[in-house]
Amino acid sequence: MTKRARTTLLVGCAALALTLAVPATATARPVPARDVLPAHDGWASADGGTTGGAGAGPARTHTVTTWREFRAALSAGGEGPRIIKVEGTLDATGAGGCAAFEAEGYDFAEYLVAYDPAVWGRDRPVSGEQEDLRAASAARQAAAVTAYIPSDTTVVGVGANAGITGGSLQIKGADNVIVRGLTLESPLDCFPQWDPTDGARGAWNSEYDSAVVYGSTHVWLDHNTFTDGAHPDSSLPSYYGELYQRHDGELDIVRGADLVTVSWNVFADHDKTLMIGNSDSAGATDRGRLRVTLHHNLFRDVVERAPRVRFGKVDAYNNHFVVPRDGYQYSFGIGAESRLVAQHNAFTLPRGVGAGQILKKWKEAPVTADHNHVNGRRVDLIAAHNAQFPDEPLQSGAGWTPHLRTHVDHPRAVPYVVGHGAGAGKLR
């Protein structure tokens, strides 16, 4: 061995020894369970920021592998922050399935006979024994599949396969909550209600969003995957000539919720996906609130509400929308007193879907929609909408400028960046 080779070997060995001697914590990235929302990262970073359960001690740090353990960890007494690490997939419905929730005497076949429009008609809500038993069964399911996340809590998935199926996460009346790294398969409502008065032909209405932010503040939802999973709408039957709808939304932000950042998530294979503000009549609670940031999310094959907005100042930038070939309605819904800013997003539209369909006017409200790309080319979405729907013109200019943004990618880069970074299993 030459002198130079021996010297190189000695230097390399010394460097390796020095590396091994330094504690891993000196250079390792913080554990994701203790991550906090970065400064200026959307509305949830305002007014003190969002830290979740980052300060939790060992006694308030839980690892759960079942739905029962998860709910127990959420309700464990004592004050202060908590961290809940989810390993594997938690099944909220359980081995008994829907049958386990049925009230004695409930029979779906009898329900169908009793409320057949040919017998019941379409001009009055359903009532009577089977409807009462359906409602009782629904109440039993609700008690079993909902989980309430308290203030100062971080819920984080461990590994690529962490998630919840059949459960509904309720962030209700809380402050400072983080949910990250989970695959959330939309709950199946076991007992949808038939409403003969809903529309011209009636409709099946279901409960249970995968996650709800209700009257809560400082909430960060990051690197989750929202999906219908094994039960897309295409797999559901029809009764009375209408789809037997067993899904509600994937994410709702409602009832005075405020200061929310939704980042690096995947919303997939769903109809009514994301609603911000649930009622035109909720101005007393929602006006001046519902401030939400959506960035670097993938909306893949979703039909509508991505999102639909009422009242809130919503900043949507650097999201990628891959529009389905069939059934697409719109992406951004412009609702009562909304102030949506949609910039630097990318849209992949199939043949036959015009860019004017991306925006949907529900109520008169101004919107800012610029620097967006459709199929790789810059498009003025408002001009495209107004040309395609001249009887429903939108007014330009939401009246505010977002300032809580970290890095803004060029919309041409968004499909690649979001495609490689968004969703559960990609949290580092």
Image (cartoon, rainbow, N blue to C red):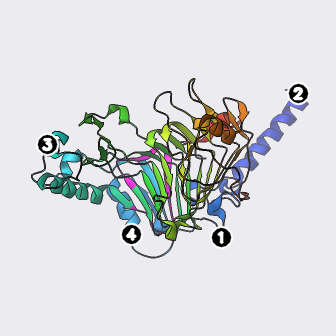
The residue that label 1 is drawn on is: 47
The reply to whether residue 152 is in sight is no
Label 3 belongs to which residue?
A: 119
| Residue 418 in the image, given as x and y percentages of width and height | 63, 39
In this view, the residue in front, 347 or 387, is: 387
- Alpha carbon of mark 1 to alpha carbon of mark 3: how far? 57 Å
Q: Are marks 3 and 2 in contact (CB under 8 Å)?
A: no
**Pointer 1 and pointer 2: residues touching (CB < 8 Å)?**
no
Answer with mark 1 or mark 3, whichever residue precedes in sequence.
1
Q: Nearer the viewer, mark 2 or mark 4?
A: 4
Q: Secondary structure at mark 1?
A: loop
| Cα distance between the residues tagged 3 and 4 | 50 Å
Question: Can you say whether 75 is above or below 68 in the image?
Answer: below
Which residue is at a point 50% across and 71% down the rendered structure image? 284
Q: Nearer the viewer, mark 1 or mark 4?
A: 1
Residue 104 x/y as whole percent: 10, 54
Residue reaching furthest top?
A: 351
The amino acid beneath tag 2 is Thr
Q: Between tags 1 and 2, which lies in front?
A: 1
Give the residue at mark 4: 76
Kind of residue sitting beneath label 3? Val
Does residue 328 appear in this view? yes
Q: Residue furthest front?
A: 391
Residue beneath the point at 55% across and 40% down: 299
Q: Earlier in the sequence, mark 3 or mark 2?
A: 2
Q: Amino acid at mark 1?
A: Asp
- Residue 165 magenta: yes
Disc 4 element: loop
Residue at image position (24%, 55%) is 138
Please, is residue 420 above or below residue 310 in the view? above
Q: Which quadrant of the structure image shows residue 9?
A: top right
